[in-house]
Image (cartoon, coloured by chain):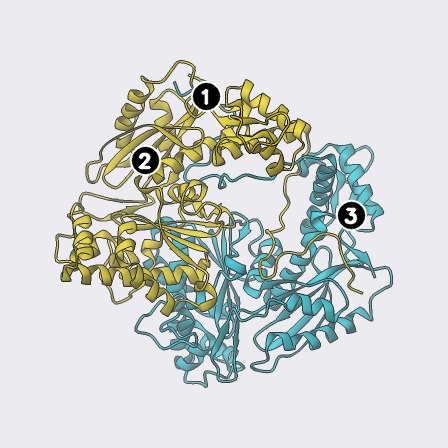
Chain colours: A cyan, B yellow
Amino acid sequence: MVTPVRSGLPRAGRPAETPLPAAPVASQEEIRRQNLGAVLRHVHVHGPTSRAELTARLGLNRSTIGTLAADLAAAGLVTEEAEAPTGARRAGRPSLVVSPRSGRVHTYALSIEADRLRAARIGLGGRILDLRETRRPPGMPVLDAVAPLAGLVRAMADAVDAGALVIGGAVAVADTSRDAEGRIRIGATDETLGDVLGAELAGPRFATGDLADVAALAEHVRGVAAGVDDLVYLHGDLGVSAGIITGGRLVAGHRGRGGKVGHMVVNPQGPRCGCGSRGCWETEVGEGALLRRAGRDPGDRAAVLEVLRSAVGGEPAARAAVREVADWLGFGVANLVNVVNPDLVVFGGSLREVYAAGAGTVRRRLDAMALPASREHVQLRAAALGRNAALVGAAELAFERLLADPLNAGVAG
Amino acid sequence: MVTPVRSGLPRAGRPAETPLPAAPVASQEEIRRQNLGAVLRHVHVHGPTSRAELTARLGLNRSTIGTLAADLAAAGLVTEEAEAPTGARRAGRPSLVVSPRSGRVHTYALSIEADRLRAARIGLGGRILDLRETRRPPGMPVLDAVAPLAGLVRAMADAVDAGALVIGGAVAVADTSRDAEGRIRIGATDETLGDVLGAELAGPRFATGDLADVAALAEHVRGVAAGVDDLVYLHGDLGVSAGIITGGRLVAGHRGRGGKVGHMVVNPQGPRCGCGSRGCWETEVGEGALLRRAGRDPGDRAAVLEVLRSAVGGEPAARAAVREVADWLGFGVANLVNVVNPDLVVFGGSLREVYAAGAGTVRRRLDAMALPASREHVQLRAAALGRNAALVGAAELAFERLLADPLNAGVAG
């Protein structure tokens, strides 16, 4: 009665994508655009790749790959060069190697962080070509960051060759800012930011993304989470926020404001949080909590690394402070692991060093609290891209429209 | 320097999909398959639809829609009939109406719930054609449910016409089961379940999904969450679990075991949970917690509705119990809203009635705890599909392969 079917069933326990109407694919032009994007995306993510390997990886035939690569080269997006012959090479015509033109095709990636503003010129393939930064005074509203950021961009642009191809820009914004009284302002990011930046630079609007989200994206595309489709990236600065990727996609939530994990309440009897609630995760694991527990001024960010170094060096108060923070860190990670069940949790920002100093404690708390089926497979790792993750991720946002439509996305300038 | 581009930027604050290499779309056959799927999916989700409306909705031209509909009709998946003329009709040839053949094309959808086993025959378009159930004794292992479920399927199959088209089957499994001592077993679902069910019925393996996940899917496709792409569906029975959909996709997590929100710790000083941890959310909001607070036997599931009715009727102990459970319900919802930032939270299973009885308390706690940017837009709603959500959702899983490849997915039987 129930007889075999040709197409596969969804994987056990993993429902297929939600079946909602999808826009049908219709035209040859659309196919060509997708294929051009696939080739360009491959070399953008994986670096120089031979035509032969592209043929194998993308499931297209050799002549199609040849045409696509030639079109991308003619548009100035890639180069094609013969591989240097090596002793081990097979006989026959060598396959051309397709490389992204990182020096020519670039974007401007910006970040508005807790206490600084950063700007980078990043080439196709994720190469950082130029990098500048300036201080962000405490309490500086996001929109006030536009003028100094635009200044950094202009300074970088002055050094760029006339033939360069600029792919718009993008800006990453830390989710936490504080007003003059130290109260947390969240979700207060002005939604006109991208437009205002574009107008200031006489160009199109900048893409915008949450700092933890785009840092997660960067670690996913070219960091410690490359190849992992289910991950939680935790970013620590004044507070704690997350970029959550499931099934290879960011969990953006309403208006991109998902991942405010720092305000998950873990301790109903805990200290009052700047958001108005009590016992939020970041009151137990934020930089202020570490400093307070180590007997330091909770507002003295510069002392965070000092406390972490003292802990590694064996200083008892610092060790106790790190242990307590790491225990609460594992507590929140356990909750997230139960809810999201990722394969990987990545610690970034200042949580990178907290994790490095207290990894055993984090893992012990996770193992004591999370369900076996959720925690047994999960890996914990320090972020790979360090301070540059948000900029690299913002560049990915900006490059996305080039990869979606390679021959219609950029303008020389 | 930064000049206009043709393609759009990602929406403010909402990063584009993670840019990883996608398999390029290449063949005409693939396009036809996608278009056939789009037409069939439309009538499956939205019901009978005229060719004219399909043309408008799917962005294909009229003759293409005509060919696709005719092919689907020839395969016995849809009917095409002339619209009954009405006074308000425009002049000209009436557009044919395409309808899913719900009576002919069907699947077997099963659910293994906390205390019962259910089986339904569900037609294309989500129509329940037949429905049977039997008791699941406490502690019955999942694989022991195969024989009785197969018996229910055989009984339904006996009543089916010879010309029917069966689209495999799918089974939803509650994430929580308890062993003879009442300890919680989670993630213990035997992964061979789908194979064993298929073998027992001499057919292909059954798709499997977590009960809360597929119930979320059902509410998303044809329930209270239709048209909402970011939602958290909460399912209450012995415990609490969630189906989380973001950007229109289920958050499956590793092996589909995401959404174990019942074991998010909300009260570190709270009662010991059957999972071995302490203060898990379900120890505060599960059926046992409600019964305990109302002074009833925590194991007496039959009394749950009684307590809820007494509370609505004004009985003080029941009202206090509901208020306390609703307050903790709002607590966990606030955490999930901060983490995921959905547009909608749906209460299903026994939480449907808990929410109905304590909606004001849930909302007050949410508003006191979650960040304004996360909670201001979020809607709270009781589930629409009631007890049948899991079966309807399992059918969606099973139909997915038909919708992916309409002419190669089913076999008459």
Left or right, residue A323 beside residue B112: right
Name the residue tied to disc 2: B111
| Rendering coords of residue B243 (x, y %) | 40, 48
Left or right, residue B28 beside residue B121: right
Residue that appears at 44% across and 68% down: B371
Secondary structure beneath label 2 = strand
Q: Residue A346 or A197: which is nearer the viewer?
A: A197
Asked if one can make out residue B276 in the rendered structure from this viewpoint, the answer is no
Task: State whether residue A31 is above or below residue A170.
Answer: above
Secondary structure beneath label 1 = loop
Name the residue tied to disc 3: A407
Q: For the residues tagged 1 and 2, is the chain the same? A: no
Q: Amino acid at mark 2?
A: Ser
**CA–CA distance in space, label 1 to label 2:** 22 Å
Residue that appears at 19% across and 36% down: B137
| Mark before the other along the chain sequence, 1 or 3 | 1
